[in-house]
Every structure is written in structure tokens, then in C-alpha cells.
Image (cartoon, grey):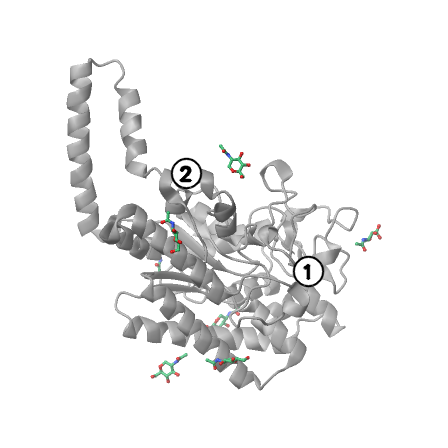
Amino acid sequence: MYVLDPTSISTCPLHSSTTQINMATSLTIQKLMLLLEICLVLFSVTTIATKDASSETVGPIFILGDSIVDVGTNNYLKNCKAQVNRPYYGVDYPGSIATGRFSNGFNPADTIVQLLGGYEESPPPFLALLAHSSNLTGDLLKGVNFASGGAAIITGIGTDLVGNVIFMDEQIQQFATVQGNITTLLGASKGQLLIQNSMYIICVGSNDIMNYVLYHPTTPEVFIANITATFGIQLENLYKLGARKFGIMGVPPVGCCPVSRAYTGSGDCGPISNGLSATFYTALKSLLKNLSSTLEGFKYSLANSYNMTMSVIENPPPEFKDVKTACCGNHSIDGIKDCKEGGYLCGNRDNHLFWDAFHPSQAASKLSAKEMVFGEDPNFVTPINFSTLRKA
Ligand SMILES: *[C@@H]1O[C@H](CO)[C@@H](O)[C@H](O)[C@H]1NC(C)=O
Ligand SMILES: *[C@@H]1O[C@H](CO)[C@@H](O)[C@H](O)[C@H]1NC(C)=O
Ligand SMILES: *[C@@H]1O[C@H](CO)[C@@H](O)[C@H](O)[C@H]1NC(C)=O
Ligand SMILES: *[C@@H]1O[C@H](CO)[C@@H](O)[C@H](O)[C@H]1NC(C)=O
Ligand SMILES: *[C@@H]1O[C@H](CO)[C@@H](O)[C@H](O)[C@H]1NC(C)=O
Ligand SMILES: *[C@@H]1O[C@H](CO)[C@@H](O)[C@H](O)[C@H]1NC(C)=O
Ligand SMILES: *[C@@H]1O[C@H](CO)[C@@H](O)[C@H](O)[C@H]1NC(C)=O
């Protein structure tokens, strides 16, 4: 059971009236009080209007998934082997801090919310809020990031390699705690409205595929059907908790990450993992279409990370000089362990598609976020883009 204590949370309306007071310091007390009264009246009108036209309301952003969008969750876990809170990770993050992001700087969780607006970076990890709950100040209402490096759709797979991580089902339980705390804080109807107007960014599935390729536990068809059905149940569970706006990032061509190229021997992309990544995208597209026709108010945007990444690999834009090798680490199979101080670090981190053996560079994360948030091409994001979903 997770216990968050949001008693010290202040809500945004308080901040806007404070600004009004500062602007009005030169006025007489009487005028000030009048202004405040008008302000409050205007404010409640705005609130009601916003409630009615829910299209104008944007709630917090919640992020779930794996290392592509983890912003430090795993730092808080014992017996976790998928931890990167050490240089050179974070070398391009403000202050060169290794926050636990699997990136040289910002990752897609950051670059997406930056473009959606109102955020300097991803909301903080749930486990960070839990650890610091005694001085929680409003963070909960800006959103929470539950993503954990090594996480998969199927609970428990790959733990021989990554150790203790937070799988999707547990991330959803953590979200249930936050949902309950927000409802307690704001009251049932306001809380529920906020939860519905929130956006849920989810990036998961790569680790399921990597694990399948290592162990081949069943046929590809059964495997894809299983992860698709399981993911569908997870989305329904989020829906039952009030989630409505789902921004889903499909799985990139995992066969083309440097670690997979190392496995093939030839340096080519791994055909089996790429095939599964593409097939899973098609299954996801069908799943989301079905969910939106059966669950009232279910809205989604699906990013075709497979296509986005393949198009950069096949036709690199001029800013990317290297779309094959890892910028950090010694190009060996044991990719994450190798990216560390004293190891290999490329000369120009901004012209590499991959940061380490598994993960996109900050530059790649910025490029893909642009496509997801503002893109018009249905081969890359469908049926609407993330910015349209946010306002939907
Ligand atoms: C937050 O939610 C958890 C789980 O429901 C609960 O135990 C805890 O008391 C809640 N905290 C507050 C302040 O509501
Ligand atoms: C908030 O909590 C963290 C972790 O316990 C601590 O480092 C920090 O000093 C606290 N901040 C305040 C203002 O109490
Ligand atoms: C998926 O496979 C796992 C075992 O790997 C099994 O426990 C689970 O029931 C399956 N789920 C579905 C929906 O087929
Ligand atoms: C979506 O619904 C169609 C028609 O009922 C079905 O054939 C298909 O298997 C479903 N897709 C998924 C991924 O559940
Ligand atoms: C993107 O996806 C479409 C089908 O959805 C496919 O026809 C096209 O070739 C793909 N493009 C790339 C670059 O993979
Ligand atoms: C990576 O290669 C460099 C240069 O060859 C070497 O100094 C370093 O020890 C290697 N690091 C690891 C982690 O293997
Ligand atoms: C994508 O986003 C842009 C900018 O917000 C918007 O103008 C455009 O209509 C969107 N496209 C789709 C297909 O949603």
C-alpha cells in the first residue's frame, strides 16, 4: 500500500490570486478588496465555464511505462539492476546531473510534456513523491511519473537481468493511490473531473519483445496476442480509475538498437525483434480502435515509434550523422553497464540517434516528441496527435 500525504498541497487558483494582489499593492485597501471580490467572482465564473466546456480544461499529465520514459523511479528501488544514476548519464541534463534518466539529457517523457506546454520537464517519479511526502507541495496536481526502467506489460519477465523493477500492473496500483489522494484533496466531483481531463502517456512493450527474443517461450502469434490482451486489460483498469485521454507510444524497432545489432553479428537490425515490434503496433492500433468504440469517452493518440525511428534510420536527417551506434559505452552487448565514466563517449552527442545500447539520445527524443505532439502524418501518429488529444 502506498501512502501519499497531500495535506500541504496548494492549488493553482491560490497562485493566480496572489499575483493579482502583488499587482494591486499600490491601490488602497478598499480598492484592493473590491478588486479581489471581482477577481473571485470572475474566477468562479471562469471555473464554471471551464467545467462546462471541458475542451478548455487541461489536467495533469501521468506517465507510465519503461526506461524510455523513466525519470528516476529506479533510483528508489532495492535490488534493481537497471539503474543509471551515474555519469555519463545526464551529461547534458541541466547541471549535468545523473537523475536516473536513461539518456544524456531529457528523455521523451520530458520532451513531450515540454512541447505540450506548462512543463519544464516530466512530472517527478511517484517514488520520489512518496519518499518526500512530508513536504509534498502541489506536485501531485501537476502529474506523476510511474515509469520504471526494465518494466514490461507482463509482470515478472526479464527480472533475471533487471532485478527488482515496477511492472505495469503495479504502476497502475500506484496510480490508483494518487487518484484516491487527488479525490480526497479536491472532493469527488472535482477530483474525478481532473482525472478525466488528465493525459496518460504510456510507453511499454520493448522489454516484453526483448525477453521473447531471448527465450522464445511460445509462438510469435500467441505472444503478440498475450501482450495485446494484457495491455488492453491494463488500459481498461486505468479507464475504470477515470483515465480518458491515452497518448500511447508504440514500440520502436528494437532490433535496430545497438545491442540488437551487436547480437546479429552482421551489424544489421535483428529481423525477429523488428517483426514483432511492427506486428505489435498493428495489434495496438486494432486494440485502441476497439476500446474507443466500447468504452464511452475513451480517447487516444497512437504514435508509430516503429515508423518514426525507421524513417530516421533509412533517411537520416542532416543533423544525425550516426544512426547505428551508441554514443556512450563500448559498443559491446552489455550496453547499459558499459556506459560509465572512463568508458567510451562519442564526440558529438547531438548527432547520434542512440545514447546507449538501448535508448534514444536527447536529440532523438526531441525529434520524436515534435512528431508525436504536432505531427500531421498518420504514418507517425494517429488518429490525432498528442496536442490535439490534450485539448480534446
Ligand atoms: C493516499 O491514498 C492511500 C491509499 O488509498 C491512503 O492510504 C492514504 O491515507 C492517502 N493519503 C491521503 C492524505 O489521503
Ligand atoms: C523535503 O524532503 C527531502 C527529503 O526528505 C529533504 O531533502 C528536503 O530538505 C525537504 N525539504 C524541506 C523544505 O523540508
Ligand atoms: C499471458 O501469458 C502469461 C504467462 O506468460 C499468463 O500468465 C497470462 O495469463 C497470459 N495472459 C493472457 C491475457 O493471455
Ligand atoms: C478488435 O475487434 C475486432 C472485431 O470484433 C476483432 O476481430 C479484433 O481481434 C479486435 N482486436 C483486438 C486487438 O482486440
Ligand atoms: C509506415 O507505416 C505505413 C503503414 O502504416 C507503411 O506503409 C510505411 O511504409 C511505413 N513507413 C516507414 C518508413 O516505415
Ligand atoms: C571502454 O574503452 C576504453 C577505451 O578503450 C577503456 O579505457 C575503458 O576501460 C572501457 N570501459 C569499459 C567499461 O569497458
Ligand atoms: C496536430 O497538431 C497541430 C498543432 O497543434 C494541429 O494544428 C493539427 O491539426 C494536428 N493534427 C492532427 C491530425 O490532429
Residue at the image point whose x is 51% and y is 77% from the top: 279
Q: Amino acid at mark 1?
A: Ala
Q: Residues within 10 Å of mark 2 (few under 14, many from 20)?
A: some
Q: In which quadrant of the rendered view does residue 270 lie? A: bottom right
Q: Position of residue 332 (x, y in %)?
A: 77, 62
**Horizontal arrangement in the rendering, residue 201 relative to residue 26 (left or right):** right
User: What label sits on residue 357 in the rendered view?
Assistant: 1
Amino acid type shown at disc 2: Thr
Looking at the picture, does residue 110 appear above or below residue 32?
Answer: below
Residue 289 can be seen in this image:
yes
Quarter of the figure with the N terminus: bottom left
Quickly name the residue at label 2: 137
Count of all numbered marks drawn on residues in the image: 2
Q: Choose mark 2 or mark 1, whichever is in front.
A: 2
Q: Nearer the viewer, residue 305 or 7?
A: 7
Residue 235: image location, x then y, percent: 39, 68
